[in-house]
């Protein structure tokens, strides 16, 4: 018998000790995906606490077995054959929020968010910039080399 | 309405006397004055009567971002603060300050390019901006009296952890003339004393909670050409960093070995984080440092002048020798305390403190004047002094009005005041501890100082230092490279060599560029990229700011046209100053300071040559050489016709 399991995905890895908290990752992400800048439209979320000196980043870990993918009632979450990214197909999303409930990291971490368009909620999450030749834009532009992109085969 | 690019589109106005809140379109100002410092000047020209009391309800406080704030543009997370500045001595006038952090960006994500505060409240209030252009004026009785860190944390508790606030501490509340406006753990609008202006209006804080979920069009800063902007980012990164990684954090700090955790920190949103590069004044954040003496755990930023809370030593030839070393944990505690109370560190360390210790060594300070020994290696001395100023206790009440006013009242030590002019302490002036320029470079510094309304070394002067010395991200270039760049930019290599010749050209260029830097805004420590260690000839690319502006706004600007805007802003500021009584005589008030011997070769200013240089400066500026006023034709040429007719009516 031929069992086919869900395709493995690449992932964005974060090195907090190098991060300077500049927020370029968020701005680059929103710029690439939305044509403008606002961290609320970014698929990667930076926490910059200058009172404690803690910087951290929240971004989809591209689960081996993605709950969001399985639960979506309209199959709006798709898997990119090239990178393995689990991404939300904007045209298909009906805004039901089931993926948010299924995400093992939410609500503690901001992995899946939504924007509003004519009062309709459109959810989005990291798609590893699957259509971008240079790979994820946050990784490319991070001035501190605090982000790296690991392909599916390089993940442990 | 057409689609806005770069700007959010609205400026918020709040009148604290009658609780009126309204908005106006940014478009009204942006075309001719871009943003930040430019728009602030336009508002000041139209709305601030000259010679008003900075603490009166007639004064207005302008917070202004620009088209690059909050977008993917290097070092762009800055906000201008402007108004009549109580720190200016002897008579307050209009000037500006600016701060990093994320406050400005968050303001734009909430749909506002700026805030203009007018009037004054009877009781403590704060402004809360949230969602998309929702504005509330709220009671601040419970916040009044709190330090700036506690205030911000309290507001985060109330309005969500993403809330960014610009606020004042006890110093601002008590109208200390060197009180600052603070955001995060040490991003401050320092010079000018604008914290006290907030205090006089009983405005404790402005808080912004921009939307993180459900963002609609209003909160999104549209970029006209995203692809081009990414290309430009890469280009800047290459010139600044050459594709290298940020270097390791150095293992020593201010001459001592570092046993504590510290890392590079971007103090301004979207900053490439190049501060430091192994230098002590760079931007570092320190983490969880145990301060034994005060039984606290300290974290926080320490950059620019703040490392001098740790250690300090005057140059060998100094008339009065000052030297001390404070343990890093205690120094960080003192630095945090000054930010928490809201006191201007530059003026405190580079002005008041130096004067106080010098006077003490000269035997001018009466024991009764200070309740503690003048001993900078003792942390308690610092803590005591800061508290006394912020709460106006004892002699602190005098120091709270600025050390110039204090010295005048005490009738002591005026000859030791490390102040260049108009209430601002030495900085890039070739004398004293923070002189950093040798002869003849400080001649450019002298011109900058003589014609500005404040210490010019925060948004204007660092570019020259980057070129002639290597500063910040630039390591020193070859002499020939420096000369070639100077020739290309300013028409002659004499701009960086021969004594008084050809010094007005770089000064004017730097001033015009300084206006643009803080109008876009971006960071004077980064832009203009005048030099680079990653090109063959050492030159940077000074057209980049204009290109970034064009990519974001879609408005096509050549470098030349862009420089004209800078010139327009500088001239408008000059006219505001003229209306306040500024003239050539005021400009020449820098001369006594520069008559002091410089810090390396004891060279003094040649007064005659400097006056000739001023003549040349005015001529190149299109200003009258006798009065120092911009001529009518110059103003008209800069499309300031209405300004010209008012000035000459």
Image (cartoon, helix red, strand yellow):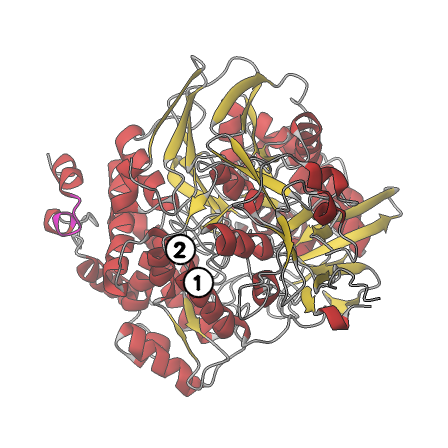
Disc 1 residue crowd, few under 14, some 14–19, many 20+, Cα 10 Å? many
Residue at 35% in and 62% down = B547
Where the C terminus of chain B falls, by quadrant?
top left
Q: What stretch is highlighted in magenta?
A: B635-640
Question: Does residue A55 lie above or below B251 as drawn?
Answer: above
Residue at 38% in and 49% down = B519
Q: Give the camera-side residue of B615 and B461.
A: B461
The subunit carrying tag 2 is B
Horizontal arrangement in the rendering, residue A104 relative to residue A84 (left or right): right
Sequence order check, earlier mark of 2 and 1? 2
User: In the image, residue B200 lies at what x, y percent?
Assistant: 51, 23
- Residue under circle 2? B517
Tell me whether marks 2 and 1 sit on the same chain.
yes
Q: Give the camera-side residue of B364 and B29.
A: B29
The subunit carrying tag 1 is B
For the residues bearing labels 2 and 1, Cβ distance under 8 angstroms: yes
Q: Distance between the residues labelled 2 and 1?
A: 7 Å
User: In the image, residue A15 lies at what x, y percent?
Assistant: 74, 62
Residue B75: numbered disc: none
Residue at 51% in and 49% down = B77
Using the rendered image of the protein, determine whether residue B316 is visible from the camera's viewpoint.
yes
Q: Give the camera-side residue of B157 and B323.
A: B157
Residue B621 sits in which quadrant?
Answer: bottom left
Disc 2 residue crowd, few under 14, some 14–19, many 20+, Cα 10 Å? many
Residue furthest front as drawn: A1
Where the N terminus of chain B falls, by quadrant?
top left
Q: What element carries label 2?
A: helix
- Residue under circle 1? B527
Question: Does residue B448 lie above or below B648 as drawn?
Answer: below
């Amino acid at each position: 018998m031929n069992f086919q399991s869900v395709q493995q995905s690449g992932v964005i890895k974060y090195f907090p000790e190098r991060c300077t908290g500049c927020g370029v990752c968020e701005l680059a992400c929103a710029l690439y995906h939305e044509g403008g800048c606002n961290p609320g439209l970014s698929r990667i979320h930076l926490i910059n606490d200058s009172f404690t000196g803690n910087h951290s980043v929240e971004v989809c870990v591209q689960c081996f077995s993605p709950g969001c993918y399985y639960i979506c009632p309209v199959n709006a979450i798709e898997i990119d054959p090239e990178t393995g990214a689990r991404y939300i197909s904007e045209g298909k999303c009906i805004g039901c929020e089931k993926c948010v409930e299924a995400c093992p990291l939410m609500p503690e971490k901001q992995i899946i968010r939504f924007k509003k368009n004519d009062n309709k909620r459109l959810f989005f999450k990291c798609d590893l910039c699957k259509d971008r030749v240079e790979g994820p834009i946050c990784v490319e532009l991070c001035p501190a080399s605090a982000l790296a992109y690991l392909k599916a085969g390089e993940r442990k | 309405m057409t689609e806005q690019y770069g700007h959010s589109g609205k400026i918020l106005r709040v009148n604290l006397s009658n609780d009126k809140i309204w908005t106006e379109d940014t478009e009204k100002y942006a075309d001719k004055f871009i943003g930040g410092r430019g728009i602030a000047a336009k508002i000041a020209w139209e709305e601030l009567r000259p010679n008003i009391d900075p603490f009166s309800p007639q004064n207005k406080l302008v917070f202004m971002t620009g088209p690059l704030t909050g977008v993917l543009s290097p070092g762009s997370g800055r906000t201008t603060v402007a108004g009549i500045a109580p720190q200016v001595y002897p008579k307050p006038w209009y000037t500006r300050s600016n701060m990093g952090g994320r406050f400005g960006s968050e303001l734009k994500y909430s749909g506002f390019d700026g805030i203009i505060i007018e009037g004054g409240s009877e009781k403590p209030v704060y402004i809360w901006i949230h969602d998309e252009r929702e504005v509330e004026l709220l009671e601040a009785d419970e916040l009044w009296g709190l330090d700036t860190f506690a205030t911000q944390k309290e507001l985060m508790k109330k309005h969500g952890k993403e809330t960014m606030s610009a606020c004042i501490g006890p110093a601002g509340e008590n109208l200390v003339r060197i009180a600052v406006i603070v955001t995060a753990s040490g991003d401050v609008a320092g010079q000018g004393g604008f914290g006290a202006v907030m205090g006089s209006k009983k405005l404790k804080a402005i808080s912004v909670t921009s939307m993180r979920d459900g963002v609609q069009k209003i909160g999104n800063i549209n970029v006209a050409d995203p692809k081009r902007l990414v290309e430009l980012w890469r280009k800047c990164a290459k010139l600044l960093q050459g594709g290298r990684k940020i270097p390791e954090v150095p293992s020593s700090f201010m001459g001592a070995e570092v046993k504590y955790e510290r890392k590079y920190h971007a103090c301004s949103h979207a900053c490439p984080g190049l501060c430091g590069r192994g230098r002590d004044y760079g931007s570092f954040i320190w983490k969880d440092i145990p301060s034994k003496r005060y039984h606290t755990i300290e974290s926080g930023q320490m950059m620019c002048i703040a490392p001098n809370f740790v250690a300090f030593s005057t140059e060998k030839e100094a008339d009065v020798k000052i030297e001390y070393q404070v343990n890093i944990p205690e120094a960080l505690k003192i630095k945090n305390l000054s930010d928490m109370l809201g006191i201007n560190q530059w003026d405190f360390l580079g002005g008041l403190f130096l004067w106080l210790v010098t006077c003490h060594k000269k035997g001018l300070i009466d024991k009764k004047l200070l309740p503690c020994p003048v001993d900078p290696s003792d942390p308690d001395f610092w803590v005591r002094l800061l508290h006394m100023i912020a709460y106006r206790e004892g002699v602190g009440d005098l120091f709270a009005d600025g050390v110039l006013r204090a010295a005048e009242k005490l009738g002591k030590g005026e000859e030791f005041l490390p102040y260049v002019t108009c209430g601002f302490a030495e900085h890039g002036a070739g004398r004293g501890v923070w002189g950093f320029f040798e002869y003849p470079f400080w001649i450019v510094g002298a011109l900058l100082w003589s014609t500005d309304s404040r210490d010019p070394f925060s948004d204007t002067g660092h570019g020259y230092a980057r070129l002639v010395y290597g500063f910040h991200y630039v390591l020193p270039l070859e002499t020939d490279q420096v000369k070639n760049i100077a020739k290309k930019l300013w028409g002659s290599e004499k701009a960086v060599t021969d004594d008084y010749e050809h010094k007005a050209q770089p000064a004017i260029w730097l001033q015009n560029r300084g206006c643009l830097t803080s109008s876009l805004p971006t960071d004077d420590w980064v832009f203009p990229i005048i030099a680079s260690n990653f090109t063959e000839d050492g030159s940077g690319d000074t057209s980049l700011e204009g290109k970034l502006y064009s990519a974001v706004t879609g408005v096509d600007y050549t470098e030349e046209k862009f420089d004209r805007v800078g010139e327009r802003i500088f001239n408008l500021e000059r006219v505001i100053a003229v209306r306040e009584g500024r003239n050539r005589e005021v400009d020449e008030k820098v001369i006594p300071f520069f008559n002091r011997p410089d810090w390396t070769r004891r060279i003094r200013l040649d007064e005659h040559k400097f006056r000739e240089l001023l003549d040349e400066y005015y001529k190149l500026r299109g200003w009258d050489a006798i009065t120092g006023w911009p001529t009518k034709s110059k103003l008209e040429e800069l499309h300031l016709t209405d300004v010209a007719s008012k000035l000459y009516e």
